[in-house]
Image: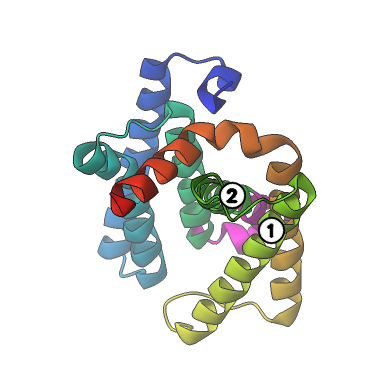
Amino acid sequence: MTLGDRLGLTDAQERTVARALQLLLAVLFVVGVATLNAELAVSAGLALCVTLLPALLRREYGYSMDAGLVCWIAVAMVLHTAGALTLYEWFQWYDEVTHTVSATLVAGIGYAAFRALELHSDEIDVPPTFRAAFIVVFVLAAGLLWEVLEFTFGGLVTVYGIDDIVTDLVFNAVGAAIVAIWGTGYVTDLVGFFRGRLRSRDG
């Protein structure tokens, strides 16, 4: 079952949702530029670019990503970008929700790449338990890298301190656990795409 099937929406409806979220990101980018809010403009601009990756994959490689996954990406990007509108300061739970959703996205992509490599190579045979552990470790490593980047570009993004970093990592782990336990089946098509790219490279 794909994520699109689980959402219970048609492909057309899901793509409409994704386009609406992309439009919202574009509006936030314009608002950030117009108000000289560098954090909002940079966040919205980068997030919008990320949401365009499925279209790029379709054009360059002929891979049509499940519309549910496209929505998943767009929702994660919008949540993160909207935080620049002081939502992180207003609501503690908003930061926790955002990190959990973003972590599920990172976990899904990391798992898909790892599983594709495992299926591609006859020398790699990983037990399911280790796959779950890999997802959590991968997300935590990506989260640590993100925190380092936030400190590096402290002039463009707001840094809230050590306590916030610990909280972020905890909810990153929650998102990773959600995918490890329930979500790996939703990225099966992405696994197939990555495996196909590995075969193409070998060929």
Q: Position of residue 79 (x, y in %)?
A: 53, 49
Up/down of 146 relative to 82, above or below: below
Mark pair 2, 1: CA separation = 8 Å
- Mark 2–mark 1 CB contact (< 8 Å): yes
Residue pictured at 38% horizontal, 50% vertical: 198
Q: Main secondary structure of the magenta part?
A: helix
Q: Position of residue 86 (x, y in %)?
A: 55, 61
Colouring scheme applied when the structure was drawn:
rainbow
Q: Which residue is mark 1?
A: 134
Q: Nearer the viewer, residue 174 or 130?
A: 130
Q: Which residue is mark 2?
A: 111
Residue pictured at 51% horizontal, 38% vertical: 72
Seen in the image, is 99 located left or right of residue 3?
A: right
The magenta region covers 85-100
Name the amino acid type tagged 2.
Tyr
Q: Position of residue 104 (x, y in %)?
A: 62, 48
Q: Position of residue 130 (x, y in %)?
A: 75, 54
Up/down of 158 relative to 152, above or below: above
